[in-house]
């Protein structure tokens, strides 16, 4: 059977169910062949030429292309317009950050050696890079990988989520309109099988993956037999947020709601577990519930502007509401029930549940607006509970003293550790990634340049000069003449 069979792929608006986009699944063999042909010229082009067209792409997104992309993101993901606008602003901003990061992390350097010898450190692109990304931030996440890879001189094949192909196609078309050659940046549409064919293809030199831990584990096993290829994994999290001694319960509740329910909880850095000092538990949870009850949930263009849109589709919403019921049936105490307010569409209200009395708490990433709460009596127990996970992406402390924060920071197993800010508050000029099942120690963000090129060290002299100072016999002059 031909593994590159072309079939229709359809995207629907989660808020309305209307068809948004229709296209064909990709042909990996063909796309890799095109990339192989286009890559050498792009890699050999002066850096200044590559940067010119890449900056042109950012300029387009600050104009009419950006307004179109905002609307498209909102329609295809269901996220509110204000949130889609913030995503597009990040896409444009990350271009300048990636240029700075490339110069900072992978620039050419001269290293002086002994006796005037010169060493030069340069970086070479990997070649053809596969980028596989999820639906929740369908423009910002791919762009965060693609731009550093292009700056370094790679060719890129993007495999976006099959749930957001329209945004990906628009993004790639914008790259092409900006002047980046068609073969240097391509998109291949399809589901998991398309992603597998891309990651396994012998013509790929590296894969950058953002998505679930389950798929990340599969890729790690697959690449264990290919040490010549680079694999970057940015995976999910079962992220904790601790509330300790704080007098500003209202602000604490705001930070919790932002951590847990922004983008309908569909962020890898979203808070999944709320750990609260026992004496504060009822006060804090009452305020969190009061605020969650006020959240406007609606379609992206709705008035008043919603805080939350729908989940990406009904299958995801069904699984999440079933998870809430499962937690209840295993000892969880509902604080705010998760309900489906719009029949037939994937809208859900935030769910909040006290799981303190559960004998075993599932260590999984429940990707949506579902917050599990735990009471603890001691700060050390709070840290232990926060670390009671195989993941290690993001963690936050609200309240506490500076000494307690220092203790929390030192003992937290996470790549992002915040104090009195949400778990999903990331710094664009910093690395972003996690440990454990949240990644393989190759953070993205500002450090993305690190896995888009490899270092080459060269010892260089203008003229050949060689000396052997020890270990040679004395030269036999008498026997050296010709016979």
Image (spheres, rainbow, N blue to C red):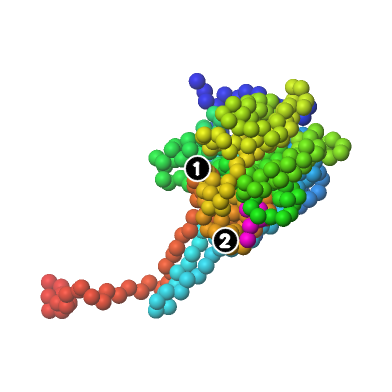
The front one of 401 and 339 is 401
Judged left or right of residue 224, residue 335 is right
Secondary structure found at label 1: loop
Q: Nearer the viewer, residue 112 or 134?
A: 134
Residue 18 in the image: above or below residue 52: above
For label 2, the residue is: 406
Question: Magenta span has 289?
Answer: no
Is residue 159 visible in this depiction of the protein? Answer: no
Measuring from the top left, give residue 27's x and y in whole percent: 57, 30
Q: Relative to residue 333, is residue 483 drawn left or right?
A: left
Q: Residue 12's mark?
A: none
422, 134: nearer the viewer: 422
Q: Name the quarter where the C terminus is drawn.
A: bottom left
Q: Quadrant of residue 291?
A: top right
Task: Find the distance from the CA under tag 1 to the CA under tag 2.
Answer: 22 Å
Q: Magenta residues: mostly which secondary structure?
A: loop
Residue 302 appearing in the image: yes
Residue 374 vs 316, above or below: the answer is: below
Residue at the limit of the structure toward the front, as seen here: 279
Residue 115 x %, y %: 39, 79
* Image location of residue 323, percent across then percent down: 61, 29
Question: Do residues under tags 1 and 2 come within 8 Å of each other at their CB atoms?
Answer: no
Q: Residue furthest right?
A: 303
Where is residue 431 shown, x and y percent of the image? Answer: 59, 55
Question: Which residue is found at the position 56% from the left and 53% from the top?
Answer: 379
Q: Nearer the viewer, mark 1 or mark 2?
A: 2
Q: Is residue 62 above or below residue 264?
A: below
Q: Residues within 10 Å of mark 2 (few under 14, many from 20)?
A: few
Q: Please report the bounds of the magenta region as a residue range.
A: 397-401
**Picture residue at 40% right of the left edge, 40% below the top:** 225
Q: Secondary structure at mark 2?
A: helix
Residue that carries the numbered disc 1 in the rendered image: 390
């Amino acid at each position: 059977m031909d593994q590159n069979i072309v079939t229709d792929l359809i995207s629907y608006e989660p808020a309305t169910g209307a068809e948004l986009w229709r296209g064909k699944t990709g042909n990996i063999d063909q796309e890799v062949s095109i990339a192989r042909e286009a890559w050498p010229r792009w890699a050999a082009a002066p850096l200044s030429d590559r940067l010119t067209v890449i900056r042109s792409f950012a300029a387009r997104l600050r104009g009419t292309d950006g307004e179109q992309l905002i609307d498209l993101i909102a329609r295809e993901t269901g996220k509110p317009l204000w949130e889609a606008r913030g995503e597009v602003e990040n896409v444009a901003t990350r271009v300048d950050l990636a240029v700075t990061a490339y110069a900072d992390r992978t620039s050419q350097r001269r290293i002086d050696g002994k006796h005037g010898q010169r060493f030069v450190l340069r970086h070479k692109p990997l070649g053809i890079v596969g980028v596989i990304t999820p639906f929740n931030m369908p423009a910002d996440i791919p762009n965060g990988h693609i731009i550093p890879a292009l700056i370094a001189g790679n060719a890129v094949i993007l495999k976006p989520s099959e749930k957001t192909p329209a945004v990906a196609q628009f993004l790639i078309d914008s790259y092409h309109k900006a002047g980046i050659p068609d073969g240097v940046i391509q998109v291949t549409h399809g589901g998991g099988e398309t992603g597998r064919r891309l990651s396994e293809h012998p013509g790929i030199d590296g894969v950058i993956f953002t998505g679930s831990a389950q798929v990340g584990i599969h890729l790690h096993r697959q690449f264990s037999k290919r040490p010549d290829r680079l694999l970057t994994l940015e995976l999910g999290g079962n992220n904790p947020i601790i509330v300790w001694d704080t007098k500003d319960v209202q602000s604490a509740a705001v930070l919790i709601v932002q951590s847990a329910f922004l983008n309908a909880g569909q962020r890898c850095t979203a808070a999944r577990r709320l750990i609260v000092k026992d004496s504060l538990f009822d006060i804090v949870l009452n305020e969190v519930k009061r605020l969650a009850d006020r959240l406007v949930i609606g379609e992206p263009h709705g008035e008043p502007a919603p805080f939350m849109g729908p989940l990406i589709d009904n299958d995801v919403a069904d699984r999440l509401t079933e998870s809430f019921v499962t937690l209840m049936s295993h000892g969880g105490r509902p604080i705010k029930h998760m309900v489906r307010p719009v029949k037939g569409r994937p809208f859900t209200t935030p769910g909040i549940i006290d799981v303190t009395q559960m004998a075993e708490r599932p260590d999984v990433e429940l990707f949506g607006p579902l917050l599990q709460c735990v009471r603890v009596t001691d700060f050390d127990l709070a840290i232990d509970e926060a670390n009671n996970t195989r993941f290690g992406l993001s963690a936050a402390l609200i309240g506490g003293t500076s000494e307690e924060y220092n203790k929390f920071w030192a003992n937290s197993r996470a790549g992002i550790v915040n104090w009195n800010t949400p778990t999903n508050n990331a710094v664009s000029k910093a690395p972003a990634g996690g440990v454990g099942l949240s990644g393989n120690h190759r953070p993205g963000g500002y450090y993305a340049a690190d896995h888009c090129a490899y270092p080459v060290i060269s010892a260089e002299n203008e003229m050949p000069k060689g000396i052997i100072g020890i270990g040679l016999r004395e030269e036999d002059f008498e026997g050296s003449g010709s016979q």
